[in-house]
Image: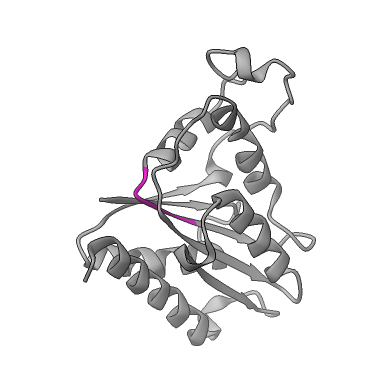
Amino acid sequence: MKIVAISGSFHVNGNTRRLIDEALKELAAQGIETESISLGEHPIAPCLGHEDCGTLKACRIKDDATGIIKKYNDADAVILGTPVYFLDVTAQMKAFIDRNFFTFTHEGIKKAKIAGLIAIGGSAGAEATINTLKAFTFLPKEDVFIVTGYTRDGDIKDLPELLQLAREMGKKMAARLTGK
């Protein structure tokens, strides 16, 4: 079993990554293989909206998105995490979401049956951000685990309740994956 976590933040050691890492620790403790991908470390161009996308054998854009999308589609479960930027997902996460259109036009199958969603903001927009991520997963609400919160000072370490919620999300996802 494998879970892939995708962070839409440029901050490799930021709040979003910290929450993702807390969830992944719980999954790994149950023997589940984990991989964490930070979109900010990869060149991912936005979708160009090719009108003939469905007829192409491969996406015309040559960057890291293709490999990340394959890992995302092959995972047994996924975690999507993003900071809230102007009341929604970051540009990196939006580009990733949009680039998945090629998969949809080619009847691509996502293996994941459950998802963890994380959105952390400064003061507003976490709910809208979660709605964007939830819509992208195409999973029923009972198969989606959510952590949201706000930190005005910019440091999640001062909010142990959010770190605990991320750990609990990881435990719940592990239980669903392992049947324990």
Judge whether 69 appears above or below 27 on screen. Answer: above
Is any atom of residue 116 visible in this view?
Answer: yes
Q: Residue at x 54, y 51 (%)?
A: 137
Residue located at (25% from left, 57% from top): 32
Closer to the camera in the image, 79 or 163:
79
In this figure, what is the number of numbered marks?
A: 0
Quadrant location, the C terminus = bottom left
144 vs 37, nearest the viewer: 144
Image x and y of residue 9, in percent: 60, 54
Q: Which span is picked out in magenta?
A: 75-79
**Magenta-drawn stretch contains 167:** no
Quadrant housing residue 73: top left
- Does 69 sit above or below residue 140? above
Q: Tell which of 84 and 76 is nearer to you.
A: 76
Give how far across and how far down residue 67 sits, in percent.
Answer: 45, 31
Left or right of 167, for residue 45: right
